[in-house]
Image (cartoon, rainbow, N blue to C red):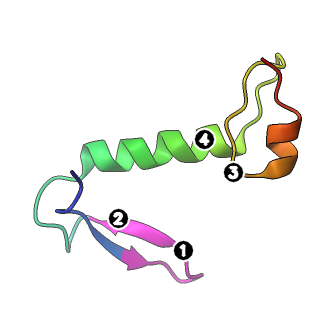
């Protein structure tokens, strides 16, 4: 699905999609990465469902 997206590393070692090296447009892939990152980092203020790979955040999640 995203095989056309090339990845490069920024100055601190974080991977990021590269527009210059990719073979096609990467807008949808970039948007999906940002949404996933936001969902994994930000715990909901209302005590709703929190999807996270961090065990501490997941333990605080309520259904």
Whole-number angstrom distance, CA of label 4 to CA of label 3: 12 Å
Q: Which stretch did the figure color magenta? A: 8-18
- Which one is earlier in the sequence, the residue at label 1 or at label 4? 1
Q: Residues within 10 Å of mark 4 (few under 14, many from 20)?
A: few
Residue denoted by label 4: 38
Whole-number angstrom distance, CA of label 2 to CA of label 4: 16 Å
Q: Quadrant of residue 16?
A: bottom left
Cβ–Cβ under 8 Å for marks 1 and 4: no
Residue denoted by label 2: 17
Q: Residue furthest left?
A: 23
Q: Quadrant of residue 40?
A: top right
Label 2 residue SS = strand
Residue denoted by label 3: 53
Cβ–Cβ under 8 Å for marks 3 and 2: no
Identify the mark at residue 14; answer none if there is no mark. Answer: 1
Quadrant where the C terminus is found in the figure: top right
- Judging depth in this view, the residue of 58 and 6 nearest the camera is 58
Label 3 residue SS = loop
- Which one is earlier in the sequence, the residue at label 3 or at label 2? 2
């Amino acid at each position: 699905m995203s095989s056309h997206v090339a990845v490069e590393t920024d100055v601190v070692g974080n991977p990021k999609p590269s527009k210059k090296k990719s073979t096609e447009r990467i807008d949808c892939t970039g948007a999906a990465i940002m949404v996933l990152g936001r969902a994994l980092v930000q715990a909901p203020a209302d005590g709703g469902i929190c999807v996270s790979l961090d065990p501490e955040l997941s333990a605080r999640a309520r259904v």
